[in-house]
Amino acid sequence: MSEKKVKKTRADDRNSGISRRSFMQGVGAVGAVTAAAAVAASTPAWGGQSMRDAFGSFFQDQYKKMTPEEIEAALARIERKAKRRFGVDIKCANTPPIPGVVFGYAINISKCKGYRDCVYACVEENNLGRDSQMQYIRVLEMDQGTRKLENSEHYYDPEEVPREGKYYMPVQCMQCDNPPCVKACPVEATWQEPDGIVVIDYDWCIGCRMCMSACPYWARHFNWTTPEVPAEELNPVTHYLGNRPRPKGVTEKCHFCIQRTRKGRLPACAEACPNGARIFGNLLDPDSEIRYVLENKSVFRLKEDLGTEPKFWYFAD
Amino acid sequence: MSSVCNAQQEQAQGQSGLSPVAGDAAFQIVPRIPELTYHPCTQCHQFLTPNAEIRDLQSPHPSELDHGDGRMWCLTCHKIDDRDYLTTLLGEAVSFDDAPTLCASCHMQRHNDWASGGHGKRVANWQGERVIYSCTQCHDPHSPTIKPRAPKPAPPVRKGLEPHQGIAEAYEPVWERLLKELDHE
């Protein structure tokens, strides 16, 4: 629409004799009718849930305050909801952290070639909304010889990677040891688990997005719409704090594939990397691969000066 | 004894003393022989006379050797009198499953990193038994550099945040309009 046209319609309104008052009255009347109709017809009873689940969800407490029985009930509710929504039998687990394990991650930026295989493996593993186009991993294309994040490009799309004069640096949740997002949350919907993973209780999140603005790594993402996943692509192995189907209006982020790593498996991104650039392991195990890297390579962390203590290192060799 | 423990039957032959492995990490290597199309090589080579002359080879052998800048040729790594085995620089037979031992003859530092976890790729789990891929799983030994390839699609602009179409055409920059109004006055 052009500017001229806009001006013309405004002028027409002024001359048409409809007063602002009568217009607003009309809008009010239409609104009331619509609301009544919505209650009567379009909204399914109990928001598409059973009465038991609607009440159960409403009175559900924060994850850490729930008793084991309440958690079991919540997990069963999640499974029933997924069955109703997707028609798929999912298994929602509550695998506890492994004692004596703190997870760490290292990326070899001289091996990362920017293929983005990790990004899509993550989308599939973690039931990220295909329509909301959320991605936990951001692969930045950087100018060689610099570490200027402001000059990085993550929409790069050449015929072939790596491009001349560029290197690639994937950024995701750093699972900070001093996480600013946790401090920003006004309702304690996000916290750090004993194995170092910063998790979110999606049922407790109020969607205020304070954590997103607190995160210096752009690691948190907001569900502006209900994340839609085709039923046949839904990953049925889920975790309460991880990849279970999320509602609209909550924040989410990388959780080191909590549903896999707490069972001893590698995160999906590490398994997908064809170049072996991603190294994952237990920081407390002196024989682990991650400890070998930290002790023998020149590692750095992103925005180290902020004091967030990321458990996510980068190195080159 | 080297701490590289892999295909058990090959261990006696695989010990070249050329693989300085840091630490005490025990691991398994994913075997490569099941994935090799023409192995065992003696299927054909038992009927052929060994010829040590450096020459261009025909298919199924690779025609070019893009490894070592022309310092090497087939018999640098392949054992001339037993084609089912590779050979270290010292002439010891090495199984195709145990290629890293051969690679370590030159790339000791890399081999050290690989055995300890700083290079290469672990299979499936971070906990429990350590199973890692062999060098030749990722690197073509005849042309070891990783080749460029197409990336997966770029991230889309998120739903609801699409750039508006035609804004630039419909509206001139605000300063242009203000300047024009100034001119009129």
Image (cartoon, rainbow, N blue to C red):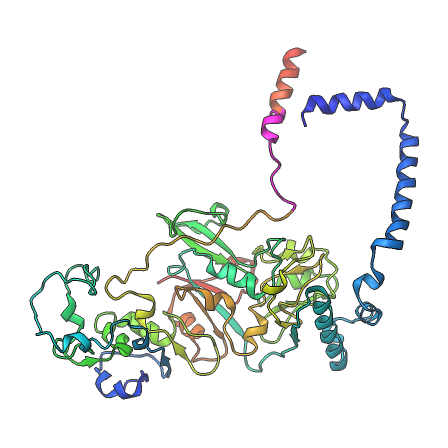
Residue nearer the viewer, A32 or A293: A32
Measured as percent of width and height from the top left, residue B45 is found at 15, 75
Say which residue appears at 48% left-offset and 61% top-offset: A118
Residue B3 vs A134, above or below: the answer is below
A76 lies left or right of A297: right
Residue nearer the viewer, B1 or A245: A245
Answer yes or no: is residue A173 visible.
Answer: no
Q: Is residue B169 magenta?
A: yes
Magenta-drawn stretch, dominant element (helix, strand or loop): loop
Say which residue appears at 62% left-offset and 36% top-offset: B164
Answer yes or no: is residue A141 visible.
Answer: yes
Measured as percent of width and height from the top left, residue A2 is found at 67, 25
Number of marks in the rendered image: 0
Residue A64 vs A234, above or below: the answer is below
Residue nearer the viewer, B7 or B24: B7
Q: Magenta segment range?
A: B160-174
Residue nearer the viewer, B33 or B164: B33
Residue A19 vs A182, above or below: the answer is above
On-image quarter of the C terminus of chain A = bottom left
Residue A10 vs B36, above or below: the answer is above
Measured as percent of width and height from the top left, residue A43 is found at 83, 56
Q: Quadrant of residue A206?
A: bottom right
A160 lies left or right of A97: left
Q: Is residue A189 magenta?
A: no
Say which residue appears at 61% left-offset and 76% top-offset: A194
Q: Quadrant of residue A67?
A: bottom right
Measured as percent of width and height from the top left, residue B46 is found at 14, 78
On-image quarter of the N terminus of chain A = top right
